Image: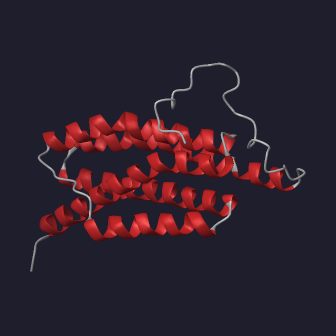
Amino acid sequence: MQGPQSERRRLLEKLLRELVRSEEQAIEHAPREAKRIGETPPVSALRDIAVHALSMKPRFAQLLDGHSIAAGRGGITATLSTLRHLVTDRIHDAERAYRAALLDLRHGVDVVRVLREVARLEELFALIRWCDDWLAARRTLVARVEAQLGWFADQAFLPAASSDDAPAADSTASGAEDPSARLDRP
């Protein structure tokens, strides 16, 4: 039988794999939804999360290296996750796909909350600090994504646009520099 530290270390490695997968999904959601509904406020909220994920990535890699922790991506789980997204992209309407993206984001928050506690027990201080910083920003960003659910209800009462019309208005029309501009856009 393995001791509690060995079990915690296995849990830590599993959570790190889940976090890597969750952050990759957070980066992929904005371009996927932009293809579906255009540059709208909900997509803008998803892009903000993608920018946050990209900005936290180098620090995450550095702390893993500093603590000599590997966070490889699980093969079959990653494949199944990608397959799920391919299938749901084809069968779900925009609102349902957006809610699925929101569920993925909430899952990421839960993973980091548990990861923080394991890091505390393992005395991985850089990881604790990273989790604290990540949670402080991401909770606010996820709340913005949640707030955009109302946009879909508003769209249900608008007259249907012809197929020649562009998707809803661009939320960056103010001319300000968009911090997510470096993300791949369709």
Residue that appears at 79% across and 45% down = 164
In the depicted structure, whether residue 180 falls above or below residue 25: above
Residue 77, image x and y in percent?
33, 69
The image quadrant of residue 76 is bottom left
Residue that appears at 45% across and 53% down = 109
Residue 85, image x and y in percent?
49, 64
> Is residue 25 left or right of 40 when viewed as pictured?
left
Residue that appears at 54% across and 39% down = 47
Choose between 114 and 156: the one closer to the eye. Answer: 156
In the depicted structure, whether residue 92 falls above or below residue 164: below
Return the residue found at the far bottom: 1
> Is residue 73 left or right of 40 when viewed as pictured?
left
In the depicted structure, whether residue 112 falls above or below residue 165: below
Q: How many marks?
A: 0
Residue that appears at 83% across and 56% down = 156
Q: Quadrant of the C terminus?
A: top right
In the depicted structure, whether residue 156 falls above or below residue 46: below
Residue 177, image x and y in percent?
57, 20
> Is residue 183 left or right of 164 when viewed as pictured?
left
> Is residue 183 left or right of 79 when viewed as pictured?
right
Return the residue found at the far front: 164
Residue 95, image x and y in percent?
69, 59
Q: Quadrant of the N terminus?
A: bottom left
Choose between 177 and 147: the one closer to the eye. Answer: 177
* Colour convention of the picture: secondary structure
